[in-house]
Image: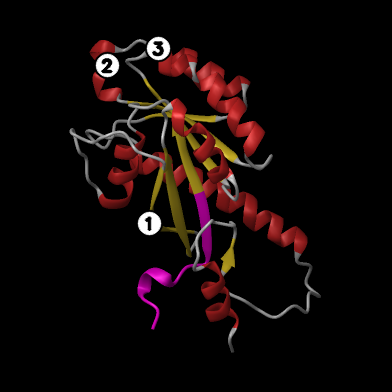
Amino acid sequence: MGTKDDEYDYLFKVVLIGDSGVGKSNLLSRFTRNEFNLESKSTIGVEFATRSIQVDGKTIKAQIWDTAGQERYRAITSAYYRGAVGALLVYDIAKHLTYENVERWLKELRDHADNNIVIMLVGNKSDLRHLRAVPTDEAKTYAEKNTLSFIETSALDSTNVETAFQNILTEIYKIVSQKQIKDNPDDDNSPSNNVQTITVAPTDNSSGNKKSCCNS
């Protein structure tokens, strides 16, 4: 029998990218489990967690992938962009180099991800304002120039973490639901199906989900 966690209207795959040490794993754990670990080690390869939110009365299940930032894992992580409909491109506001590398991450995202992916630039560790190396206005201007949304967060004190994920998931939902209206005219005779899976996640149980949703 399915658990409550299996009940959702949309499944969105979102990837976290950016240099090692910018706080991607803690953003993930803060949003999905409301946890923060000062001792967190660098992610090796890829890990993911899920959380469901409500948007316009629909249940959106977010499958959030945390990709390792170190160079030696870049080849592994590029495969995980496949099927992603959203990306949080994270830098550390106290380390200018992580912001400079945003350009490279953005290029990698454009090379490997879907053209219509929703991207949010995230300046993390806003609690380190006394060590700030990246001016907010500079990052905001960069985001506007590259048609990205922008927010500053702190996984440590929870500032804007919820807002960042809610905003990107809502934006994805709006794009997907508008596309469905265009793709499904009123005379559409296709079988009704409440669950719309909007990602091809590299997990083994995807075929199982298909079976359960299509059995009458």
The x, y position of residue 180, in whole percent, is: 69, 60
Which residue matches tag 2? 129
- Magenta stretch bounds: 1-13
Q: Is residue 182 left or right of residue 34?
A: right
- Tell which of 123 and 166 is nearer to you: 123
Residue at far right of view: 187
Q: Between disc 2 and disc 1, whose residue precedes?
A: 1
The x, y position of residue 7, in whole percent, is: 44, 72
Q: Between disc 3 and disc 1, whose residue precedes?
A: 1
Camera-nearest label, 2 or 1: 1
* Residue name at image x 28 percent, y 44 percent: 30
The x, y position of residue 98, in whole percent, is: 42, 18
Q: Are the residues flagged by discs 2 and 3 in contact, CB closer than 8 Å?
A: no
Disc 2, SS: helix
Near mark 1 (Cα within 10 A), the count class, few <14, some 14-19 or many ≥20, is some
| Residue 51: image tag | 1
Q: Is residue 3 left or right of residue 203?
A: left
Magenta-colored stretch includes residue 136: no
User: In the picture shown, does residue 91 fall above or below 8?
Assistant: above
Give amino acid for label 3.
His
User: In the picture shown, does residue 144 fall above or below 43?
Assistant: above
For the N terminus, which image quadrant?
bottom left
Give amino acid for label 1.
Arg
Residue at far bottom of view: 216
User: In the picture shown, does residue 17 fall above or below 53?
Assistant: above
Which residue matches tag 3? 96
* Residue name at image x 41 percent, y 28 percent: 70
| Residue 189: image tag | none
User: Alpha carbon of mark 3 to alpha carbon of mark 1: how far?
Assistant: 31 Å
